[in-house]
Structures are given as structure tokens and as C-alpha cells.
Amino acid sequence: MVNVKNIVVIGVGLMGNGIAQISLMAGYNTTLVDIYQGIIDKAVASIEGGLNKLESKGVLNAAENMARMKTSLDLSSAVKDADLIIEAVVEDMDVKKKIFKTCDENAPPHAVIASNTSTMSITEMATATNRPDKCIGMHFFNPAPLMRLIEVIAGEKSSDESMEIGVKVSESLPCLRGDRYIAKVLKDRPGFIINRLNAPGSIYSSYLLDQCLEKGIPFESLDADYGSGGPMSPLVLSDYTGIDTGYHVRNYYAETLHEDFRPGKVITKMFKEGKWGRKTGQGFYDWSKGRPQPDFSKIQKAGLADLRIGLAIRLNEGCRILEEGIASGWKVIDDANMAGMNFPGPFEYGIKNWQGLVKVLEEFAEKIGSEYLKPCELFKSGKFVDMK
Ligand SMILES: NC(=O)c1ccc[n+]([C@@H]2O[C@H](COP(=O)([O-])OP(=O)(O)OC[C@H]3O[C@@H](n4cnc5c(N)ncnc54)[C@H](O)[C@@H]3O)[C@@H](O)[C@H]2O)c1
């Protein structure tokens, strides 16, 4: 197996800069590539700042790490000595395919090319190369130095050896918040494991938001149904990640999984009106004075959201992931969710109550006329319980 020494990270925006930092910290010679010098400069400053902080805690020697860093605006020459390339540019298939092609034409024959795509097909990216066996996915979670999960994804033609290289390197990348957790994604399906598990929640949220619109209930009342159990309530989080992102992701799943994912009336209207949340200053909340801090003890609840429905939807999707052979067992799905999202997966609790949850979901899918949300065969049979 190839002994990886040189890693090239392409696209050093939000994700790439974190990936480059942990690559350096693991001891690899790391080259940062982008199309803008300003973004490279920002990434270098951010990595240096992060390393200096760790040096002050006695964790590492920042200068030793920085000495292994190179930067480049020229992809062709940057990959000449690469053993592993990690692409983290914009989520656009054409751009990613062009990059895979340039890497294939210029990197040594043994080099593995990985994509950090959140949703897109590794198999399709690999068609732009003459080394589909050496193309894999390495899906990090944001921010890469802090989130424990990395999904390593097999495209249709990825070799076992390329997957092993992806897993081995992923295991070697330090995580500042606990032990790394590597989930092998055995089939190249939209959203892989964790984004897929949580994807159909968007069908439920579209329904709830449209109910608010129909009944004249303020959106913050829907947020109050959930309260702020986590660092952000669901609608503050939607504003934070971007209503535009939510809109595009729903459409992507509508095209690749099922029409039921299409954005509802509220999300479509907000998208068209440019109410994209944090980045435009207005979404469900006003962001013009910084992050909103709704006081849910003073906001009347909508009484619309049912946590059991949310759980049943996630458990059903977990069963589909098993049915489609994407993950080897439900423990991987639960552990990966904790490592990537910081909250428990649906199985540990769900297996004790699955019959009731099947019923809850059957009734709900019938009520809103959703084909996709109907319990799948594996969920209804209860056979998933033994697929640990
Ligand atoms: N943001 C997240 O939470 C997250 C999480 C996991 C995976 N991802 C995935 O990671 C990838 C990057 O996302 P991001 O949020 O870091 O985006 P970003 O916009 O912050 O960074 C993308 C970078 O790629 C650069 N770039 C664009 N075209 C390029 C090219 N041809 N060559 C070199 N560099 C180029 C841009 O200049 C930019 O710096 C996407 O595929 C995204 O789906 C994002």
C-alpha cells in the first residue's frame, strides 16, 4: 500500500483550511491550492493562528508544522508529487470533474484523488479520470479539526486499496475534541450516511412551516416547540446555514431521491425574496444586529412539532440506509451521527419502541400524502434490530 507523505488540499475555504491544518498536524507535507491568493493568505493565517494556540498549550511546535506547508495557485504543478489529493472546492459537479481531470493528468499514477463533497456522486467525478479505482470520497464535518467524523466513501469503481488508504489517513488526522471516528460508506448514494439520515427531516420541516403559514402562526412559535436544546434552535440554525442552501439541498434530493423533498411554500418564498438568513441579514429572524437570541420561555408554542414523528422519520431513513447497503450496521449510523452532528442517532432508542414508531409514521405519511415518508420494508419488519 502507498505510504502517504504528501497531501494536496484543493480549495482552502471554510472546509479546506481545517482539513489542511489537521493534515499538517498529522505530520504530512501539505500543499494548499486555491484560485485566489487572498483566500490562501487567509487560510495560512488561520492555520498559523490555530497552531500557535495549540503550541501555547504545549500540544505541538507551530514552526515545525508550518515548515511542512506549501501553497500554490497552479494545480497542475502542485500535484506533481502528491500521494493523496483532497478536493474541497465549491459543490459543483462540473468544477469538481475538471479538477479530477487535471489531477489525473498531472499527479503520479499511484496518487489517490478524494472529494470532500457533502452529497455528490464520487462515481461520476471518477469518470473524468483514467483512474476510477483511485477515486474515493473523504467527507469531513465542519469544522474538520473539531468534528470527530470522517466518512470514507467508495465509488462504484474504487479499489479496496484506495479505500484502505482513505481510512488509514483519516484515522491519522487528529481531532481536537475526542477520538476520530471513521465511517466506511459502502455505496455511493446521495448524502452518504449522515446527511442522508437527516435529509427527510426537511420534508417534515417544510410541512410544519407551511402549516404555520396557513394557520397564521409566527415561525418563532414553531421554534419554541423545540426550544434551544442544542447550541441553536432549528430555525436559528436554518438561518445560520442559509435558507438558500436549504432550498438547493431539498431540490437536489428531490432530483436524486424523491419528489417529496421539493421545498415547500415558505422556503421557496423566502429563497425568492432573498431572505437567506445570516448572510443577507434577514431570514426567519433578523440578523442585522448579530445572532438572534430568542427567549423561548416568553414565546408561545405553536404546538405543531411532534418529536416522535421526527424520530420515526430518522429511524425509517436509517433503515433505508441499511436496506440499500450504504452502512454495514445500525451501530455505525448511530456512532457516526454522534461523531458528526453531536447528537444521538435514532437506533439506540428506536429499537426499543419501533412498532409504535412505525404506526406513528404510517399515520403521518398518510395524513400529508407523502410516499417517501411511508415506513420502508426493513423498518416495518423489525429485522433491522439484528443488523447491529
Ligand atoms: N461547509 C460545510 O459545512 C461543509 C461540510 C462538509 C463538506 N462540505 C463540502 O466541502 C466543499 C467546500 O465547501 P466550503 O464550505 O469549504 O466552500 P467554500 O466556498 O468556503 O470554499 C471553496 C473554496 O474553493 C475554491 N475554489 C473554487 N474553485 C476552485 C478551483 N477550480 N480550484 C481551486 N480552488 C477553487 C474557492 O476559491 C474557495 O476558497 C463542498 O463540496 C461542500 O459541499 C462543506
Image (spheres, grey):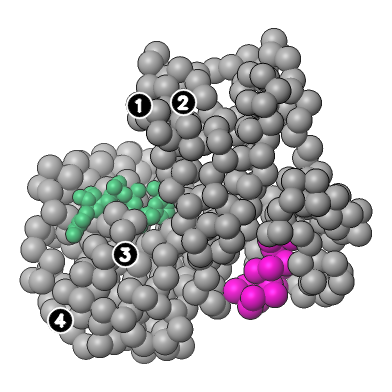
The quarter holding residue 38 reads top left
Name which residue lies at 42% across and 87% down: 157
The quarter holding residue 137 reads bottom left
> From mark 2 to mark 4, how far is it between C-alphas?
44 Å
Closer to viewer: mark 4 or mark 1: 1
Name which residue lies at 77% across and 40% down: 307
Percent coordinates x, y for residue 346 in the rendering: 74, 55
Q: Which mark is residue 280?
A: 1
Q: Nearer the viewer, residue 67 or 184?
A: 184
**Residue 278 in view, yes or no:** no
Tell me the element at label 4: helix
Q: Which mark is residue 105?
A: 4
> As drawn, is 379 to the left or to the right of 208?
right
Percent coordinates x, y for residue 115 in the rendering: 35, 67
Tell me the element at label 2: loop
Point out the tag, 1 or 3, that comes first from the N-terminus: 3
264 in relation to 156, above or below: above
Which residue was labeled with disc 2?
A: 283
> From mark 1 to mark 2, how far is it between C-alphas?
8 Å
Image: magenta residue range: 316-330
Name which residue lies at 67% across and 44% down: 204
Point out the tag, 2 or 4, that comes first from the N-terminus: 4
Which residue was labeled with disc 3?
A: 93
Name which residue lies at 48% across and 43% down: 246
